[in-house]
C-alpha cells in the first residue's frame, strides 16, 4: 500500500489541505516559493532533529518543534504553548525517511558502544540507559508512526487541522501521507 504522495504541483495537494498553511508549506518547500514580510506564525511543525531535514520556509512562518522521530509524546506542553501563543490552528507532523528512531533495538550494540565512546560512561550504565529510553523513543516505521501520532494529536486537539507528511532525505522533498482522511 503506497500511502506516500509526491507533491510535484498544486494539483497533488489533497483538497482538505488546499488554501491552508499545509499547502503553503508545500509551496514554499517543494516549489521554492518565497514570501517576505510575514509577521505572525501560521503553522506549527513537529519534525525530527535529524541534520538532513532542512525545511525551506520563510522567516516567521512556523513554530518548529524538533525531537527524535518527530515524536511529540513528551512535547505536549510545547505544542499547546505554541497554539496558545500564536493562535495558529494547523500542525504539520513531518517524519522523514531513514529515521534513526526506527529499529533502535536492532542497533542496540552500535548505539550503546557509540554512547560509551563519546561519553566514557560505564557499559552497565549505558546499557540500562538504552533499555530505559529505547522503547519510548522507538517509532518502528516512519509512515505508520506519523499516522498514529497525528491520530493521537487530533484526539487531543480536535479543532486543529493536523497533517502527516514525510521528508524524503534522498530528494529533500515533502510528501503527503494519505491517512484516508484526506
Ligand atoms: Zn529522524
Image (spheres, helix red, strand yellow):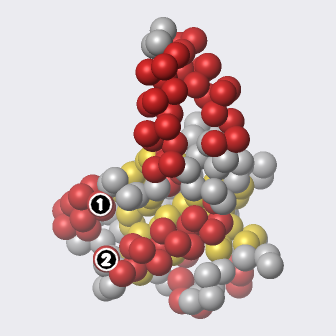
Q: Is 52 located above or below residue 111 in the figure?
A: below
Residue highlighted by disc 1: 76
Tell me, yes or no, if residue 88 can be seen here. Answer: yes
Residue in the picture at 39% in, 79% down:
154
Do the CB atoms of the residues marked 2 and 1 lie less than 8 Å apart?
yes
Q: Which mark is residue 145?
A: none
Q: In the rendering, at what x and y percent does residue 166 appear? A: 64, 62
Tell me, yes or no, if residue 61 can be seen here. Answer: no
Q: Quadrant of the N terminus?
A: bottom right
Numbered disc total:
2
Residue in the picture at 71% in, 48% down:
98
Residue highlighted by disc 2: 156
Mark 2 nearby-residue class (10 Å; few <14, some 14–19, many ≥20): few
Mark 1 secondary-structure assignment = helix
Q: In the rendering, at what x and y percent does residue 35 appear? A: 48, 60
Q: Is 116 located above or below residue 152 in the figure?
A: above
Of mark 2 and mark 1, the one earlier in the sequence is 1
Q: Quadrant of residue 32?
A: bottom right
Mark 2 secondary-structure assignment = helix
Q: In the rendering, at what x and y percent does residue 65 appear? A: 39, 52
Q: CA separation, marks 2 and 1?
A: 9 Å
Q: Quadrant of the C terminus?
A: bottom right
Task: From the viewer's perspective, tell me whether residue 162 is left or right of residue 31.
Answer: left
Residue in the picture at 56% in, 73% down:
147
Amino acid at each position: 500500500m503506497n500511502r506516500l504522495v509526491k507533491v510535484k504541483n498544486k494539483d497533488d495537494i489533497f483538497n482538505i489541505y488546499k488554501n491552508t498553511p499545509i499547502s503553503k508549506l508545500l509551496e514554499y518547500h517543494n516549489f521554492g516559493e518565497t514570501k517576505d514580510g510575514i509577521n505572525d506564525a501560521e503553522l506549527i511543525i513537529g519534525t525530527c532533529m535529524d541534520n538532513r531535514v532542512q525545511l525551506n520556509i520563510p522567516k516567521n512562518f512556523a513554530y518548529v518543534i524538533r525531537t527524535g522521530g518527530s515524536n511529540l509524546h513528551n512535547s505536549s506542553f510545547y505544542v499547546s504553548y505554541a497554539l496558545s501563543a500564536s493562535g495558529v490552528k494547523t500542525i504539520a507532523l513531518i517524519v522523514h525517511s531513514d529515521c534513526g528512531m526506527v529499529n533502535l533495538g536492532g542497533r542496540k550494540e552500535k548505539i550503546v558502544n557509540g554512547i560509551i565512546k563519546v561519553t566514557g560512561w560505564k557499559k552497565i550504565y549505558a546499557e540500562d540507559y538504552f533499555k530505559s529510553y529505547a522503547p519510548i523513543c522507538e517509532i518502528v516505521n516512519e509512515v505508520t508512526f506519523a499516522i498514529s501520532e497525528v491520530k493521537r494529536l487530533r484526539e487531543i486537539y480536535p479543532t486543529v487541522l493536523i497533517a502527516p507528511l514525510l521528508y524524503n532525505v534522498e530528494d529533500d522533498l515533502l510528501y503527503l501521507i494519505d491517512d484516508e482522511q484526506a
